[in-house]
Image (spheres, helix red, strand yellow):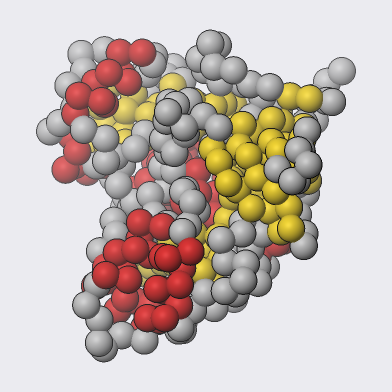
Amino acid sequence: MENNKLLSLYHNLSNNSKNHLDKIAIKYGDINMSYGELIRRIDQFSNQILRNYPNKKNFGLLEYNSIEFIVSFFALEKLNKVIYLFNPYLNQKKIKSIFQNIQLDCLIVNNDIYKTIESKNIKIIKTDQIIFDGKQKKECLNCTINLKDENSVVAIQSSSGTTGIAKYAKRTLNNYHYDIKSIITTLSYNETTTIYCPVSLSHGYGLTMGMLASLLSGATLILDKWFMPNHVLKTLSTSDIDIFLGTPTIYETLNNYENDKYNVRNAKMYLSSSDSLSFEIAKQFNYKYGCWISQMYGLMEASTVTVNLNPEESNVISVGTAVNGVKIKIYEENVEGFGEVIIYSKAISDSYIDKKTDKVFIENKYWYKTGDIGFIKEGNLYITERKNIK
């Protein structure tokens, strides 16, 4: 049976942007970039790739958060390239080891990372080699609609390390479509929403909740190159922010930061993901800043699973309920209600690039055994153990 066809992520962005080309898409430092300018730059860079690397297929992104990262991702996806997402904070030895085991054609890097990269077999593209000029007009938006196989691989995404096991999952166009839709509909992203993302876009949390769902919903994305507590507090106190994307480490740092002049209650929702949020961190953040943190639960190969939309002291360590389009239940629970968390979602990756990595489904291909232990109380999921931690 022939697979379904879906619009590419780029063409979704392009089509959705036509009615708000002048609206701010990204705020990055002193730069306020409109949707029209973002599309123009994506088109220009995709043309550069076509001219200079027409037969190259596998492209790595090793970049700190930047407009160049966003432009590179959409340009490569538009051209049906496979994007390998790498953590820019890895040390040189780890990066070298990864490159020895993964077949890349080209690697796009920030200028300040370039000096640490040594590879004779990979073409290195520094971001200062990406040239943008004012010659290409907005007519570039009127391009041919690009329908792609729903199972075409968009990116190879790596785990953050919370389970102690390095994994690289193939994320398809279908995976991203379902995940983005779940995020947008569950958290009500729209053209009036502002999302603040200081977490890395190379991580699934930052990529989908920060970059893709924001831009494909017409929201405004405030992006930091990296996390700096003083800058984050200043931005939170001076900007009208709907959703802040944080991690337990970020919140712990803000708790310990000397702050007597910034009021961060402007943000309507504080999200936490990538690791378990402790009650102590959540309680201290609420005491210091007057806000409860909404904890999320996700996996690299399944992306967004649950979110606590109504956090309070009694349930703040819960990861909440399933996002739209996802189902959760406890598998083989014991008499106390504890068991393995299994999830149903079409955002789950079908495979890893390492064939030795285990992947276990039950009942049908969409019910996935996470390896995590938890229980459900009053409809909310609580994670008590990560089975794969070493």
Quadrant containing the C terminus is: top left
Q: Residue lying farthest front?
A: 335
| Residue 279 is at least partly visible in this image | yes
Specify whether 114 is left or right of 5. left
Give how far across and how far down residue 61 sits, in percent: 36, 35
Give the quadrant of residue 227. Answer: bottom left
Q: Nearer the viewer, residue 30 or 276?
A: 276
Specify whether 295 is left or right of 186. left
Q: How many marks?
A: 0
Can you say whether 260 is above or below 209 in the image? below
Instruction: Name the residue: 40% across, 73% down.
Output: 284
Q: Residue lying farthest left?
A: 115
Instruction: Name the residue: 47% across, 57% down.
Output: 277
Give how far across and how far down residue 136 sits, in percent: 42, 52
Specify whether 308 is left or right of 279. right
Give how far across and how far down residue 51 sits, in percent: 38, 28
Give how far across and how far down residue 58 sits, in percent: 44, 22
| Residue 182 is at least partly visible in this image | no
Instruction: Name the residue: 41% across, 42% down.
Output: 202
Quadrant containing the N terminus is: top right
Give the quadrant of residue 92. Answer: top left
Q: Residue lying farthest right?
A: 1
Can you say whether 328 is above or below 49 in the image? below
Instruction: Name the residue: 50% across, 15% down.
Output: 354
Can you say whether 17 is above or below 204 in the image? below
